Amino acid sequence: MTKEKTKKTIVKKDQPPKEKASQPRKLKGVVVSTKMQKTVVVAVNKFVQHKKYKKRYKVTKKYQAHDEQENFQEGDKVIIQESRPISKKKTWQVITKQ
């Protein structure tokens, strides 16, 4: 008596068509440094809630953003938008001043 090995074939159902690419993310923040050429550092604040205690607290994250004309100064409120990688840490671009 020999056992025959049977292969199971997986049949994939028709997948729905891919949706359009989503819009790039936009964040609001404050310029905290302009010491690099064509680059500004933007601090973005957001509130998060503690999972257990439900207290809200502020978290600040800094992003390096591309500023081609070097128009922005420290303290300016700006909107940054996600873009293709410009350098190792620069994947954001400054759009407008608020």
Image (spheres, rainbow, N blue to C red):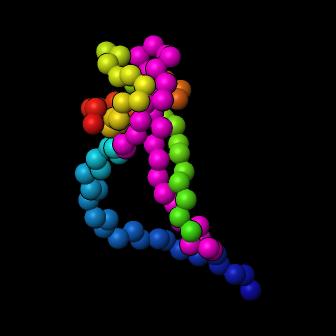
Along the viewing direction, whichever of 10 and 43 lies nearer the viewer: 43
Between 25 and 39, the one lying in front of the other is 39
In the rendered view, tell whether residue 40 sits above or below residue 7: above
Instruction: Judge whether residue 80 can be spotted in this image.
Output: yes
Magenta span: 27-54
- Taking 13 as reference, is 4 left or right? right
| Residue at 37% in and 44% down | 27
How many circles with numbers are drawn on the protein? 0
Q: Nearer the viewer, residue 28 or 64?
A: 28
Which residue: 31% across, 15% down? 69
> Is most of the magenta stretch helix, strand or loop?
strand
Q: Does 90 sit above or below residue 4?
A: above
Residue 9 horizontal/vertical position (percent):
49, 71
* 1 in relation to 64, above or below: below
Say if residue 83 shows up in the picture: no
Q: Quadrant of the N terminus?
A: bottom right
Indicate the position of residue 65 as horizontal and vertical percent values: 42, 29
Relative vertical location of residue 70 with respect to residue 76 in this rendering, above or below: above
Which residue does the image show at 41% across and 36% down from the upper left? Answer: 30
Q: Position of residue 85 (x, y in %)?
A: 44, 29
Q: Is residue 60 magenta?
A: no
Q: Is residue 48 magenta?
A: yes
Specify whether 15 is left or right of 35. left
